[in-house]
Image (tube, rainbow, N blue to C red):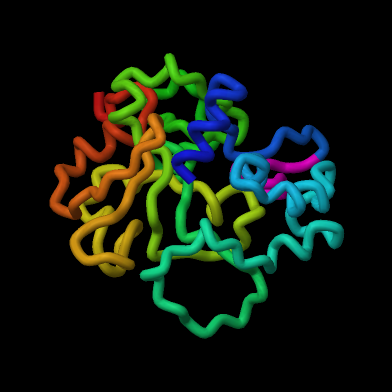
C-alpha cells in the first residue's frame, strides 16, 4: 500500500481524496480512496469492472464489496464469524483529529491527509513526508473497502491515550502497537506507548495535532 501511494504521488503529484469525486452522490455513498488507488496495485481488472459513476453499494459495484483483496488484509487479524457479506479493509486512511476530520477544510489544524474533497500535495505536509502518517492498521474493521467514510478513513480520538493496543482504535492485531504507512511510502511500527500529542501531530497536515 505504501508503494502504491508513492506511485500515485509520482503520477499525480499528491494523494487521493478520501472519496472519489462525484457531485451526484453524498460523500458517504461515494467510492473510497482505496478504489482510486486500485490501478496502482495491479488490480485494473477490478477497477475496470466497477461503475465509477455509481455509489459503492449500487448493484453494479456489489461484486467488489464482497471481494477479499490480499493487500487490504492483515495476516494477524483474527478471523471472526460475520453476518455481513461485505469485505472490509484492515488498513484505514487517517483523516486528522476528531470524528469529523474527514469533512473539515485543509486549512483546519485538525485536518489530515484524507478528506472527502482534499487532494493533498506533498508540499502541504508541514512536518515533511517522513513524519506525516497516512494509513494505520485498525482492530475495528467494518463495512466495505469500496465505501468512503468510516469503513476506510478514520480520525484520531482527540486527547485519547489509548490509540493503540487491544480493544483500542488502532491495532489490536499485534502486541504493543501498530504498523503505520507514512507519506514517503515507508512503514514503521508505532509503539502503543507513544505520547498521544506526538501521534496527533503525525496525523495532521499542520503538524500541530489540533492542540495549538
- Report whether 19 appears left or right of 211: right
In the rendered image, which quarter is residue 94 located in?
A: top left
The quarter of the picture where the C terminus appears is top left
What is the magenta range?
A: 25-33
In this figure, what is the number of numbered marks? 0
124 or 24, which is in the foreground? 124
Q: Residue at x 27, y 65 (%)?
A: 174
12 is higher (above) or lower (below) than 132: above
Where residue 20 sits: x, y (%)?
69, 38
In the rendered image, which quarter is residue 122 located in?
A: top left
- Report whether 202 appears left or right of 33: left
108 is higher (above) or lower (below) than 183: above
161 is higher (above) or lower (below) than 124: below
For residue 28: magenta? yes
For residue 30: magenta? yes
Q: Residue furthest front?
A: 42
Q: Residue at x 41, y 68 (%)?
A: 75
Where residue 148 sits: x, y (%)?
62, 48
- Report whether 68 appears left or right of 29: left
Where residue 205 sits: x, y (%)?
39, 25
Q: Residue at x 58, y 32 (%)?
A: 16
212 or 75, which is in the foreground? 75
- Report whether 9 appears left or right of 212: right
Where residue 6 sits: x, y (%)?
49, 32
Q: Residue furthest top?
A: 123
Amino acid at each position: 500500500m505504501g508503494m502504491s501511494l508513492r506511485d500515485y504521488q509520482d503520477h499525480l503529484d499528491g494523494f487521493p481524496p478520501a472519496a472519489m469525486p462525484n457531485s451526484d452522490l453524498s460523500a458517504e455513498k461515494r467510492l473510497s480512496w482505496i478504489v482510486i488507488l486500485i490501478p496502482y496495485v495491479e488490480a485494473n481488472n477490478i477497477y475496470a469492472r466497477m461503475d465509477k459513476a455509481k455509489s459503492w453499494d449500487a448493484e453494479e459495484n456489489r461484486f467488489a464489496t464482497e471481494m477479499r483483496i490480499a493487500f487490504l488484509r492483515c495476516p494477524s487479524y483474527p478471523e471472526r464469524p460475520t453476518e455481513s457479506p461485505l469485505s472490509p479493509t484492515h488498513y484505514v486512511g487517517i483523516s486528522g483529529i476528531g470524528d469529523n476530520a474527514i469533512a473539515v477544510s485543509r486549512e483546519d489544524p485538525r485536518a489530515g491527509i484524507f478528506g472527502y474533497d482534499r487532494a493533498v500535495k506533498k508540499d502541504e505536509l508541514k512536518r515533511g513526508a517522513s513524519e506525516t502518517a497516512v494509513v494505520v492498521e485498525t482492530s475495528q474493521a467494518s463495512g466495505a473497502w469500496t465505501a468512503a467514510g468510516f469503513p476506510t478513513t478514520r480520525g484520531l480520538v482527540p486527547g485519547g491515550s489509548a490509540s493503540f493496543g487491544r480493544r483500542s482504535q488502532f491495532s489490536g492485531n499485534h502486541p504493543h502497537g501498530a504498523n503505520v504507512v507514512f507519506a514517503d511510502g515507508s512503514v514503521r511500527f508505532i509503539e502503543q506507548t507513544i505520547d498521544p500529542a506526538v501521534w496527533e501531530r503525525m496525523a495532521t497536515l499542520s503538524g500541530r495535532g489540533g492542540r495549538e
